[in-house]
Image (spheres, rainbow, N blue to C red):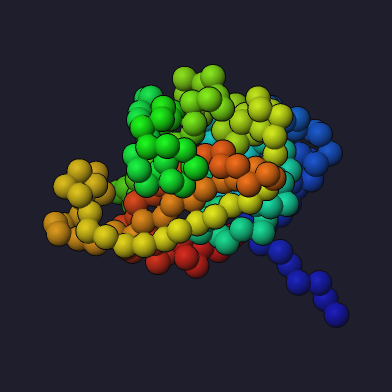
Amino acid sequence: MAAVPISKYTEIFTVLQRRIDAKQYEIGDYLPTEAELTREFGTSRATVVRALRQLSLRGWIRGVQGKGRVVLGRPAIRFAQLPDRVKHLLLTGEDAALQGVRLVSAPARIAAALGRAPGVPLLSGRYVLAPRDAPPFGLRTVFVPASLTDLTTLDPEGGLLAHLERRNGIAAGRVIERVGARLATGGEAAALRLPEPRSVAVSLITVLDVRSDPLLAVDTVLAREAAAMLSTYDL
């Protein structure tokens, strides 16, 4: 029986995975540029971008604005077991633009998710989720207990979760997601360019360590159309 040919983007994805596993690209290295990969594989830029997007969504690499794509290494098995939607919302990809970071007092809902008292200090970073040259489809806010990090940004080299694990000598062990729906606030409707009133999907993801102590919470508001898309996202 003749072998079934694989798609070009799958070939690129697989080759880059193997190079990362073989340490040809070390953790912290930057991958070749889109133009360089396009020339190497003799294909279109769109095909290269599709392969890189899959690597990013699966946790192998991460886009760094103005620099390229940094290697994270083989993702932990726990992420491979998560639903596609959760992986997409939890792992910072190229469609997430960090808007700013500040120290906040924990809102009651987030404090409960993190097992902290309301009002304790949290480092909070907000991301706008939008594909390149397309309208935004979501707003994501990451909350980290200030006691767990010395960062002034929530976009460190190698990823936030890896930083928290290294700094605190711990390992993530479990991920919990709570989903719901509500009407968008005025600010959310404006940011997502939605007519008012309009309902949005809400996802609250909590990452816990192996002792079940919460490490971080990711609170995401999604346009309903985007929520439907992410629920069947093809990884």
Please, is residue 32 above or below residue 42 in the view? above
- Quick check: can you spot residue 42? no
Quarter placement of the N terminus = bottom right
Q: Residue at x 70, y 39 (%)?
A: 171
Please, is residue 174 above or below residue 231 in the view? above
- Quick check: can you spot residue 113? yes
Q: Is residue 156 left or right of residue 42?
A: left
The front one of 33 and 170 is 170
Q: Residue at x 54, y 19 (%)?
A: 150
The front one of 15 and 234 is 234
Quarter placement of the C terminus = bottom right
Counting from the top left corner in percent of width and height, residue 118 is at 37, 37
Counting from the top left corner in percent of width and height, residue 178 is at 45, 58
Q: Residue at x 42, y 61 (%)?
A: 179
Q: Residue at x 42, y 37 (%)?
A: 117
Furthest residue in direction front, as rendered: 117
Q: Is residue 93 left or right of residue 24?
A: left
Counting from the top left corner in percent of width and height, residue 75 is at 70, 45
Q: Is residue 226 left or right of residue 57?
A: left
Counting from the top left corner in percent of width and height, residue 109 is at 37, 47
